[in-house]
Image: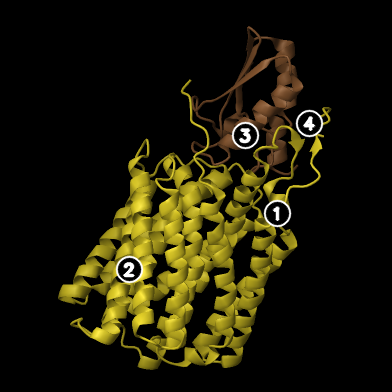
Chain colours: A brown, B yellow
Amino acid sequence: METQTPDLGHEVFETLKYIIDPEIGINIVDLGLVYKVSLENGVLSVELTLTTPGCPMSNTIVTAVEQILQQRFPAMQVQVELVWSPPWTTDMISEEGERQLNGM
Amino acid sequence: MSTATTSNSPGKWVVLPHYAFAALAFVALSILLLFSTDAFGGHYFHPKLLTLTHVAVLGWATMLIFGALYQLLPVVLECRLYSERLAIASFVLLATGTISLSYAFWTFQVGWVMHLAACALFLSFLLFSINVTQTARKAPAWTIDADFIVTSSFWLLATGSVGLLMALNFTMAFLPADHLHYLQLHAHIGMAGWFLLLIMGVGAKLIPMFLLAHPESTRKLSRAYYLINAGLVLFVFDHLFFQTGLLFLYAILVVAGVVFFLLYLHDAYKTRQRQDLDLGMQQTFVALVLLLLPLVLLMIVSSRAALPQNLLSIIYLVYGISVFLGFVSALILGQTFKTLPFIVWMHAYENHVGRYKTPLPKDMYRHAWLRWQNISYLLGYVLLVAGVLLQVQALILAGAIGFLVTSLLYTANVYLMLLHKVKNLKPFSYGNANA
């Protein structure tokens, strides 16, 4: 995970934890799906991926990220980009995500 | 970083009617089973058994697979479905063809009703096959999953062609050999060519995806693909033109292919990140275990062992049951709950996600009903197989009751999802997201 403005980045990541992957039931941050958050000229950009290419939930997750950030940061323009490189692996799941995944 | 595209999912009216029809067909199948306990005592070429088989393979299994595939094809091939109109036309033809063919078999009217039904089904398969092939042609990268799916649609078309010829032959009698000769061809290319290859192609993508596993190599899948298709092609040519008696060899090729597929899934299972299996995945693994019985029976029926005719007839019946009411039905009963909740959820909540707290797909059906569905299914299946093997009508009836209970629980859950309405959504109150 990478951010250009640490305070804002933290707030964005905390906000994105409200977006739950509908199949796995874990938020997209702890799943390691959010690759990069940056702010440039009032544009809040987020790069995220999915657990598998062609995921039928891609549109839904992108919309969810756009809508929650637009609602939380109304003064900024939100731009969400879906990326496949580097490909997502289970190594990207956080400790908290693994804890939830194993029902602990 | 390479940029990806957004969702390729088709409209809900392309997919959901298939689930609605298939659930009702499963209830109809269970009711017909209840009234057919007397039909399991003799040969499989019996009007009631032909009806049951076609309701199961067309109305229940093929209908649901068509619907699920329109949703999953874009996932597996990573591109949009070629035509939603073709998909809807194919659905209408499959539905009318199934109802009229079932009526024709039950009343054994082999005239124009059966001819029209067979034509409608053939046309439905043709449209489906065109849709699948054209979609695959747009895929950004050709994978072994695409090989399985496209080839299975050709085998479906071949199965439908033989079926159409047999339906016409009932009154026109133009085929050189007797009906049973072609029935064996029709049944085996349908079972191994259509159902098995299709399930493998989709399963090879979905099962690791649901387990959060990433198998490194698809070599085992490639071997499975070539072995099964080699076995089928050799069987078809031999059966039609040579009759060399090498059936056992072709059966070994098919069984070896299935073993490679199971080994591939075993690799995925070993490297899975998700340790807890939900009820849908548990039922999927039950289906994979149930697959072993038809494989053993395939070896027996193809070995041409000198078994008494009565015993051979029973083995053929159990073989058919173990494929359609065993492996295929068990898989559908599990995978429905890995696909339908997500499809309905996506269409219901796509505009609300990120703005309001939404339920999750797993909250859209009753888990207790699903648990009892899985239990009553396994009980019904074991009783039915035992009843047919031992030729005890009371056991067959008990099995049919098990299937009826299963179908009612399944259909109740399916319609609970299909009729789901969005209500009382609350906005987020930001605090601790993981709390």
Residue A17 is situated, as x and y percent measured from the top left of the image, at 72, 29
The residue lying at 42 percent from left, 42 percent from top is B77
Give me the disc on residue B433: 4
Q: Are marks 4 and 3 in contact (CB under 8 Å)?
A: no
Q: Earlier in the sequence, mark 2 or mark 1?
A: 2
The residue lying at 61 percent from left, 76 percent from top is B403
Establish whether labels 4 and 2 are both on one chain: yes
The residue lying at 74 percent from left, 41 percent from top is B358
**What chain does mark 1 sit on?**
B
Q: Which residue is mark 2?
A: B159
Task: Please rate how many residues cluster around mark 1, counting C-alpha atoms within 10 Å: few if below 14, some from 14 to 19, many from 20.
Answer: some
Q: Which residue is mark 1?
A: B420
Q: Disc 1 versus disc 4: distance between alpha carbons?
A: 26 Å
Q: Which element type, helix, strand or loop, lies under badge 4?
A: loop
Q: Which residue is mark 3?
A: A61
Q: Disc 4 versus disc 2: distance between alpha carbons?
A: 53 Å
Mark 2 residue type: Thr
Q: Earlier in the sequence, mark 4 or mark 2?
A: 2
Q: Nearer the viewer, mark 4 or mark 3?
A: 3
